[in-house]
Amino acid sequence: MRHSYKVAVVGSGFAGLVTARELKREALLVTVFENANHVDSIWLFNSRVDTDLLGLDPNREIVHSSLYRSLRVNLPRQIMCFMDYSFMKKECGDPRTFPGHEEVLKFLEDFARDFRLMELIRFGHEVVRVELTDEARHKWVVESRTRETESRWESKEEVFEAVVICNGKHTEPKIVEFPGRDAWPGLQMHSHSYRTPEQFENKIECARKDGKVVFQDGSIVDPDVIIHCTGYKFHFPFLRSNGTVTVDDNRVGPLYKHVFPPSLAPWLSFVALPYKAVPYIVMELQGKWVAKVLSGKFEYENWLATQLDIRPPERWKEIMFFSMEKIKSYYGEKYRDAWDVDKWIQEVDCSN
């Protein structure tokens, strides 16, 4: 008889939701911890920003979302979905192939509702510690906290037999060091804290002669604001692994197949770390793998997608994903609206 392990999932974004669904399908006892009061708060517009706009202060008040008001997705909706749950165009919704962020949030809300995942999620619970306390019996302590008042937090410790980390990769700013960065007198911010262009109206008061920026080719600009669009870094401040899992040059490891730390597998796992991949299909496959391993249906060392009774993703989705850079180069900033998706799919069909 299989044992129904208690599994903690950190995060309720795309990765956390699809992983929770797969764990639930395998009759595992799932608890999802979500810091915000909404599923995947990174897709929920929030006008608030970090108290440190550059994100360098470790004690700053952090706003999880990096969303700006006018954001539209940069992938077609046909591949921003799961293998058995399409991102369909709906009445009264955004019908565009590259919809706005509101449509993505609605898709996630529908997904959570249709698979009855909301009842598994503890909203407003920030995970502050994940630590292995009994290696022989693979017991993990998950400490979470909830805000009772503006200045008072309530903490709680619980024991789980497995933890899946799905806390995303678009919250902790990555800032590049360069000469003069810290001495520059003007406003600097990371794109994580950009929300609307209106915030820069009437910001130019004077031209600062000492605020010039010199590029490698010798060209010079004299800006009033520097926005660092330098990406994000993996960040697991809650994980106490005694050096078993590290982040070195924004690489998480050691991990088997980007999911399992070998010495802690399968009781600790990560979902949605790879960058150069069709993200949503990868999340789903990784979630299925973790669920099948924890349910005892398969040994993680020998996993193959075909042995999980799941069909491989359609070839056209892979082609669509890896063609995006060419499409962007051809159409420029207008690629979302200029691209004829139906014609493109016909061309793909003819090439197969």
Image (cartoon, rainbow, N blue to C red):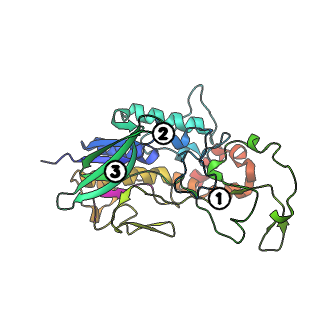
Whole-number angstrom distance, CA of label 2 to CA of label 1: 23 Å
Point out residue 133 in the picture as x, y percentages from the top left corner. 23, 58
Q: In which quarter of the image is residue 155?
A: top left
Q: Note whether residue 267 is visible.
A: no
Residue 98 vertical position relative to residue 93 in the rendered view, above or below: below
Residue drawn where x is 36% and y is 69% of the image: 243
Q: Give the range drawn in magenta.
A: 264-272
Q: Earlier in the sequence, mark 3 or mark 1?
A: 3
The answer to whether 349 is drawn above or below residue 256 in the figure is above
In terms of secondary structure, where does tag 3 sit? helix
| Picture residue at 71% right of the left edge, 72% below the top | 179
Asked whether 301 or 141 is in front, the reply is 141
Q: Main secondary structure of the magenta part?
A: loop
> Is the residue under label 3 in contact with that under label 2 (CB below 8 Å)?
no
CA separation in Å, label 2 and label 3: 17 Å
Question: Callout 1, which amino acid?
Answer: Glu
Q: Nearer the viewer, residue 160 or 237?
A: 237
Q: Which of the two marks, 2 or 3, is nearer to us in this view? A: 3
Say if the magenta span includes residue 268.
yes
Q: Quadrant of the C terminus?
A: bottom right
Badge 1: how crowded within 10 Å, few (<14), some, or many (20+)?
few
Residue position marked by numbered label 1 in the rendering: 325
Label 3 Cα crowd, 10 Å radius (few <14 / some 14-19 / many 20+)? many
Of callouts 2 and 3, the N-terminal one: 2
Residue receiving disc 2 = 86
Q: Which of 24 and 222 is in front in this view?
A: 222
Tag 2, which secondary structure?
A: loop
Give the residue number, with chain letter if any, for mark 3. Answer: 288
